[in-house]
Image (tube, rainbow, N blue to C red):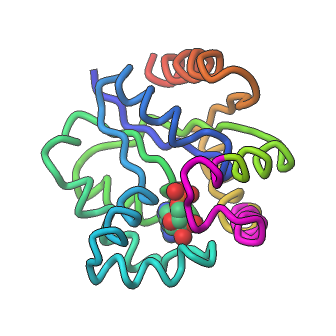
Amino acid sequence: MSARLVLLGPPGAGKGTQAVRLAERFGVPAISTGDIFRANIKGGTELGKLAQSYTDKGELVPDSVTNDMVRDRLGQEDVADGFLLDGYPRNVAQVAELKVILEELGVELDGAVEITADAEAVVARLLKRAEIEGRVDDNEDVIRHRLEVYAEQTAPVSAEYEADGALVRVDGLGDIDEVTARLVEAIESILA
Ligand code: AMP
């Protein structure tokens, strides 16, 4: 079975954790643009150096850079039967570019799933994650800015998929296993 999905939701809603679980459940790779940027930053690549000047501030990395990176990743063999995108698309221009990339590949998106969570809950989660993982973009000022960027640039992404009838929302509050079960059910309804 193939599954081509986008996972949406604010920073701190649990996208990364759930993406890994869902990818395993549906047998497709989870592709996190944030993880690809972090790996490049760690490896000291040119892409990493460029990305870091944005990620440190909680700004989006420019579309030209991000879109090329995603085009390259989606062209690889292991995603021929599907993928779960985590953290992309993050603005409406990226939604349009993803459509073009998938057209070029001759495949279609099955749908988008949005994990919902209220702002105070995600700030608390992100501050806790900062203590555990030590991510430089998890300090309170940057977190607040990332949430602003989300509200301004990424919330309209959900609205676009919703207008296309391709969006399912899932409550992200509660036990991790419970949220996974809700997501699995939502994705099964998309794929049915
Ligand atoms: P994340 O791990 O998804 O929270 O992403 C961490 C950071 O990577 C974001 O705050 C952005 O700076 C950058 N980033 C991740 N995905 C994208 C994207 N689709 N477009 C632009 N920047 C991104």
| Residue 72 among those drawn in magenta | no
Residue 11 lies, in percent from the top left, at 65, 52
Residue for point 40% across, 84% down: 50
Q: Quadrant of the N terminus?
A: top left
Q: Quadrant of the C terminus?
A: top left
Which residue of the protein is positioned furthest toward the right in this rendering?
120
Residue for point 69% across, 51% down: 126
- Asked which quadrant contains residue 72, the reply is bottom left
Relative to 113, 22 lies left or right: left
Residue 165 position (above or below residue 74)? above
Residue 100 lies, in percent from the top left, at 35, 62
Residue 105 lies, in percent from the top left, at 22, 52
Q: Which residues are magenta?
A: 129-150
Relative to 36, 93 lies left or right: right
- Nearest the viewer among 110 and 30 is 30
Can residue 93 be seen at all in this image of the molecule?
Answer: no
Q: Which is the main secondary structure of the residues drawn in magenta?
A: helix
- Nearest the viewer among 143 and 77 is 143
Residue 159 lies, in percent from the top left, at 69, 51
Relative to 84, 28 lies left or right: left
Residue for point 25% across, 57% down: 73
